[in-house]
Image (cartoon, rainbow, N blue to C red):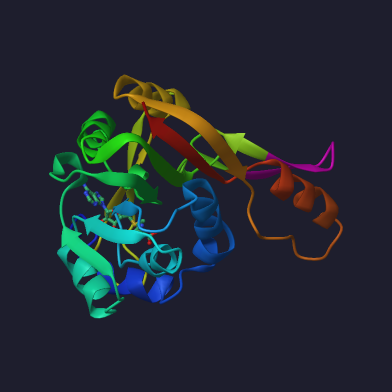
């Protein structure tokens, strides 16, 4: 049986993300997160589910005071080994954080790996000062649902559409072990948008900005390319939001 969690796939994940971030990170996620965070010098930033610490260098460059926390001991070990100046990494469970005084928190591609949502939001709100920002970057819950969404081609109308099989029911989807490894299963938690908005609101946050972000990819040249590119630009694959603790 494959082991659950990120420890068994830590080396694979670090290889995929690399020093500066995967192509998803560098083209889409990190620019969106930095725009929404709008860090001021010496602000304390908590990166929850920091993984191998890809965001640290960008926060430090923006003169933020960075702390990354992750439940995976292996990923935190890899993060510490990068020896990024002025970045602090801790092993910790997002559901039971015991910290305070942060001006901002960020969840970069991590909230959909965590459950239960309410427990995570309640735990992180205690880490933040009044007026602090929380920035979340995730797969778009309405258009990118593991195993329940995909692209389709409508021959009659000559257009590419997005197929959504299920949306409203929360799902825990095991993500299969990576091909080169025999073990390693992570769980992706799908939740409809209303769960995020209501949970944030219940624990004292107000959402003040949202970005819906399409893929950076373009179609292969060919007769369907124009229609495919139109759908790639029109249907977002990622969602970034900022909420303020009131
Ligand atoms: C897809 S990775 C994203 C990592 C990193 N933010 C990045 O963008 O590369 C999801 C991360 O969430 C972490 N995670 C899952 N559940 C967690 C929990 N309860 N507390 C803290 N971290 C958790 C995993 O260990 C993993 O590092």
Q: Is residue 189 left or right of residue 145?
A: left
What residue is shown at x 87% (from left), y 57% (from top)?
223
> How many numbered tags mark residues here?
0
**Ligand 1: quadrant of the figure:** bottom left
Residue 104, horizontal then vertical, whole percent: 35, 46
Residue 233 in view (yes/no): yes
Which quadrant, please, contains the N terminus? Answer: bottom left
What residue is shown at x 16% (from left), y 44% (from top)?
97
Using the image as rendered, state which of residue 22 and residue 230 is in the foreground. 22
Residue 51, horizontal then vertical, whole percent: 30, 62
Q: In the rendered structure, does residue 162 fall within the stretch colored magenta?
A: no
Residue 166 in view (yes/no): no
Residue 127, horizontal then vertical, whole percent: 22, 41
Please report the bounds of the magenta region as a residue range: 151-161
Residue 30, horizontal then vertical, whole percent: 50, 59
Can you name the residue that lies furthest to the front here? Answer: 41
What residue is shown at x 34% (from left), y 72% (from top)?
14
Q: Is residue 80 left or right of residue 20?
A: left
What residue is shown at x 81% (from left), y 57% (from top)?
225
Picture quadrant of residue 185: bottom left
Which quadrant, please, contains the C terminus? Answer: top left
Picture quadrant of residue 53: bottom left
Compared with residue 98, is residue 166 higher up or lower down, i.e. above or below?
above
Q: Is residue 165 left or right of residue 198?
A: right
Give the main secondary structure, helix, strand or loop, of the magenta stretch. strand
């Amino acid at each position: 049986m494959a082991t659950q969690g990120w420890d068994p796939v830590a080396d694979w994940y670090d290889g995929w993300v690399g020093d500066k971030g995967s192509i998803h990170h560098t083209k889409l996620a990190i620019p969106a997160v930095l725009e929404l965070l709008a860090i001021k010098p010496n602000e304390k930033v908590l990166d929850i589910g920091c993984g191998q610490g890809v965001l640290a260098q960008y926060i430090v460059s923006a003169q933020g005071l960075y702390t990354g926390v992750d439940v995976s001991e292996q990923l935190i070990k890899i993060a510490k080994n990068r020896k990024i100046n002025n970045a602090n990494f801790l092993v910790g469970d997002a559901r039971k954080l015991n910290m305070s005084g942060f001006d901002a928190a960020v969840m970069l591609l991590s909230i959909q790996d965590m459950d239960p949502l309410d427990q995570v939001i309640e735990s992180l709100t205690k880490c933040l000062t009044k007026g602090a920002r929380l920035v979340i970057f995730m797969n778009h819950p309405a258009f990118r649902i593991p195993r329940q969404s995909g692209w389709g081609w409508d021959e009659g109308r000559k257009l590419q559409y997005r197929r959504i099989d299920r949306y409203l029911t929360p799902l825990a989807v095991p993500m299969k072990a990576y091909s080169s490894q025999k073990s390693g299963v992570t769980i992706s938690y799908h939740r409809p948008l209303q769960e995020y908005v209501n949970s944030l609101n219940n624990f004292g946050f107000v959402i003040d900005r949202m970005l819906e972000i399409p893929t950076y990819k373009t179609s292969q040249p060919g007769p369907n390319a124009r229609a495919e590119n139109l759908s790639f630009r029109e249907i977002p694959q990622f969602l970034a939001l900022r909420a303020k603790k009131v």
